[in-house]
Amino acid sequence: MTAKSSADGPGENTAGAPQTRRAPAGAAVLREDVTEAIRSAVFAELAAVGYARMSIEGVARRAGVGKTAVYRRWRSKLQLVLDLVSAVAAQGLPAPDTGSLEEDLRLLYEVTARALRHPVAGQIVPDLQAEAARNPEMAAALQKALREGQHSVASGIVRAASARGELSELDGTDEDLALDLISGPLYWRSVVVRSPLPDGYLDLLATTTAAALREL
């Protein structure tokens, strides 16, 4: 007897085999391995052809699934990419807690630089930025991703340093400036200018940024 095992494809039940619990009629059971394959395919497609040329068909082909498997999860290419951007932002960066402002900054920069050096990130981020200039939804998603990722960790570093007495208490305007000081230079050099980081650059950046923060 043949039974449909999930929304992503059929499954077989042989006679005498233990019966698995079936979903209620009409329920869509989305297999997590298929979802992960699609997500991986999206990143690969974005790196290979860019957002403008990326298609649901191309994603499905790379993931080894049918188009319907993609459309069951996301209504459109834009929704698919926005969902992935939000998911990456939700994962966040590790929050350093070394007990020292400069060491916290150094660890943050090391993790961020390593992520930005990844070939896929180096291709995808600039492409999505270019698309954001034309697409308000994409722009809002990227802004939210940056705010929830890098800025949230930077804010934690500033507040911890203030609690230890390394920095003065900052009001809203000064805190925004502090977050820009922490996040801006490395992002500018790695993503916008795309210039290699010389030896000792991250150490110098951490020391210089800490000194600038103490002046606020």
Image (spheres, rainbow, N blue to C red):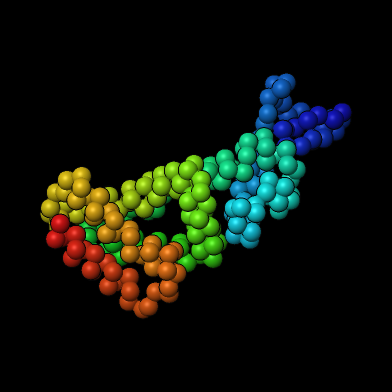
Left or right of 77? Residue 69 is right
Q: Which residue is drawn at 82% across and 35% down?
A: 12
Is there any visible trace of residue 41 in the rendered image?
no
Residue reaching furthest to the bottom = 199
Residue 185 drawn at (x, y percent): 33, 64
Left or right of 120? Residue 173 is left
Q: Quadrant of the C terminus?
A: bottom left
Residue 215 drawn at (x, y percent): 14, 61
Residue 38 drawn at (x, y percent): 65, 47
Is there any visible trace of residue 92 in the rendered image?
yes
Judge by depth and name the residue closer to the eye, 88 or 127. 127
Residue reaching furthest to the top = 25
Q: Which residue is drawn at 72% across and 47% down?
A: 57
Q: Quadrant of the N terminus?
A: top right
Q: Quadrant of residue 214?
A: bottom left
Q: How many marks?
A: 0
Residue reaching furthest to the front = 134
Q: Which residue is drawn at 57% across and 40% down?
A: 79
Measured along the vertical axis of the image, is residue 128 above or below residue 13?
below
Left or right of 19? Residue 158 is left
Q: Residue at x 81, y 29 (%)?
A: 3
Residue 121 drawn at (x, y percent): 51, 60
